[in-house]
Every structure is written in C-alpha cells, then in structure tokens.
C-alpha cells in the first residue's frame, strides 16, 4: 500500500511555531513580543489543519483543530475557574497548566506522527471487485464455414 506522507511538513510547521513563541519569550521589544507570540500561536493552531486540507483530508483537519485548540482550551478553562474560586488556587492553576502543556505536546505528537501519513486511494482501474460477477456475450461469425455462434465471457 502506498501512502501520502507529509509528516515532515507538519514537523517543520510545529518547529516554526515553537521558535516563534520562544522568540517572543526572549524578545525585549513590546510590539515584537506580541507579534511573535501571535504568529507562533496562529501557526501552531492553524498550520497543520491547513496542510491537511491542502492534502484533501478535511476529517483529519478537523481532528487536528480539535486536538490543537480543544485540549489546551480545556486546560485554560480549568486554570481560570480554579483561580476565580481561589479555594485551591495553586493546585488548580498547576493542574490547568499541565493540561495546557500536555495538550499541546500530545496534539503535536499525534498530528506529526499519525495524522500526516494517509493511505493513498487505489485508482478504479487497479481495483478488483471481489463481490460482483461480470460477464459478456460476443457473437461469432464464420463466413467461410457459414456458421454463427455466441461466446460467453465472464469473470468472478
């Protein structure tokens, strides 16, 4: 079976996203920090889903968005609700932060290792039908012997 393998493209996009976020963390200029951080987060969240769409994989694109945005979003929700209630501020914030970082790492690993390798569809001419019977009838004419006949052909 042959595969459409674009996992290296996904790895490159994720590496660029991480580099942009780390560049924002290291930047000293306030406008540059915001621009780099927004570019990094946008590349992380939308880069891989766009690549999946470009390869004709809308289902994998939706799964990629769900992983990349949904799981870290859940962690952010846990952090904000625990900080608002302040019954266990530190514990909830730490747990929420772990869900955010774990979700980001998990999304990158699943996307780059699994979702970027897709079996190519087999062209219709190469497919063999195992469940259908095909047959045909061909007339046979022998002018010298003055004969007529039929030939029955089939595949199953």
Image (cartoon, rainbow, N blue to C red):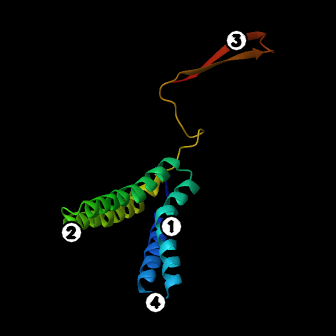
Dividing the picture into quadrants, the one containing residue 99 is bottom left
Q: Nearer the viewer, mark 1 or mark 2?
A: 2
**Image point (60%, 20%), residue name:** 135
Q: What is the spatial separation of the Cα atoms under label 3 and label 4, in whole angstroms?
A: 91 Å
Q: Nearer the viewer, mark 1 or mark 4?
A: 4
Residue 43 % position (x, y):
50, 68
**Relative horizontal placement of residue 86, taking residue 31 as reference (left or right):** left
**Image point (56%, 54%), residue name:** 53
The mark that comes first in sequence, 2 or 3, is: 2
Res. 28 mark: 4
**Relative horizontal placement of residue 105, taking residue 37 as reference (left or right):** left
The mark that comes first in sequence, 3 or 4, is: 4
Label 4, residues with CA under 10 Å away: few <14, some 14-19, many ≥20: few
Res. 90 mark: 2
- Name the element at disc 3: strand
According to the picture, the residue beneath numbered tag 1 turns out to be 42
Label 3, residues with CA under 10 Å away: few <14, some 14-19, many ≥20: few
């Amino acid at each position: 079976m042959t595969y459409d393998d674009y996992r290296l493209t996904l790895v490159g996009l994720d590496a660029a996203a991480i580099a942009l976020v780390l560049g924002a963390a290291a930047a000293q200029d306030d406008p540059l920090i915001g621009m780099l951080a927004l570019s990094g987060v946008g590349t992380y969240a939308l880069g891989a889903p766009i690549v999946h769409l470009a390869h004709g994989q809308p289902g994998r694109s939706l799964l990629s968005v769900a992983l990349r945005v949904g799981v870290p979003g859940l962690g952010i929700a846990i952090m904000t609700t625990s900080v608002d209630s302040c019954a266990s501020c530190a514990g909830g914030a730490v747990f929420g932060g772990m869900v955010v970082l774990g979700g980001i790492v998990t999304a990158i690993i699943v996307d780059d290792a699994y979702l970027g390798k897709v079996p190519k569809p087999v062209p219709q001419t190469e497919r063999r039908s195992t469940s259908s019977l095909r047959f045909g009838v061909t007339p046979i004419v022998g002018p010298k012997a003055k004969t007529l006949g039929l030939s029955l052909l089939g595949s199953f």
